[in-house]
Image: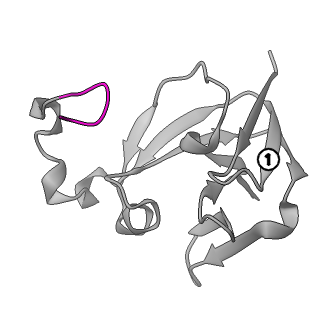
Amino acid sequence: MTSKHSGSCLCGAVTFEIEGTFDRFMLCHCSRCRKFSGTAHASNLFCDTGTLTFLSGEEKIRHFDVPGTRFLKAFCADCGSPLPRVRGEGVAVPAGCLDTPVDIAPTAHIFFCDRANWEEGLDACPKFDGYPK
């Protein structure tokens, strides 16, 4: 069954829709994804046969491609938010830019051997529903 998802960047300048089914949900721990996202891992959904349509702000999209690698990031020129991109393997979607829920759980941690040393024991950290007091 094909599904439709919508999303946007943080500032709202870029909006989009994706039509298709997410096939994979990868958590990438490579140093490039950590640097680009500023987090422990990038969370990307992949849709092998999906269609990506930008509804607004397409002129605000910039790309960064590391020569000689498969690493390509699309992002909003105004706020820097990661955005979906089309590559040979279909549509790659940073999970955090979606405004609609997804029905797939992460399917794999990739480049796990490259994870940050501070990522160990995160489950033991206190959890808060908002900013700690």
Residue closest to the eye, 16 or 130:
130
Residue located at (39% from left, 68% from top) = 35
Give above or below for 38 relative to 24: below
Residue closest to the eye, 28 or 34:
34
Give above or below for 84 relative to 103: below
Check the image and name the residue furthest to the front. Answer: 133
Residue located at (44% from left, 62% from top) = 33
Residue located at (57% from left, 35% from top) = 24
Residue 9 percent across, percent down from the top left: 67, 51
Q: Is residue 20 left or right of residue 117?
A: right
State the extent of the magenta-drawn residues as a range: 127-133
Which corner quadrant holds the N terminus? top right
In this figure, which colouring scheme has been used for the structure? Answer: one colour
Mark 1: secondary structure: strand
Q: Is residue 31 left or right of residue 69?
A: left
Q: Is residue 114 left or right of residue 94?
A: left
Crowding at dot 1, Cα within 10 Å, few <14 / some 14-19 / many 20+, comes out as: many
Residue closest to the eye, 36 or 26:
36
Residue closest to the eye, 108 or 3:
3
Residue at the spot of label 1: 15
Which corner quadrant holds the C terminus? top left
Quarter assignment of residue 104: top right
Residue located at (65% from left, 64% from top) = 75
Kindly identify the amino acid type of the residue bearing the numbered disc 1: Thr
Check the image and name the residue furthest to the top. Answer: 1
Q: Main secondary structure of the magenta part?
A: loop
Check the image and name the residue furthest to the bottom. Answer: 67
Q: Is residue 7 left or right of residue 115?
A: right
Give above or below for 66 relative to 12: below
Give above or below for 13 relative to 105: below
Q: Is residue 50 visible?
A: no
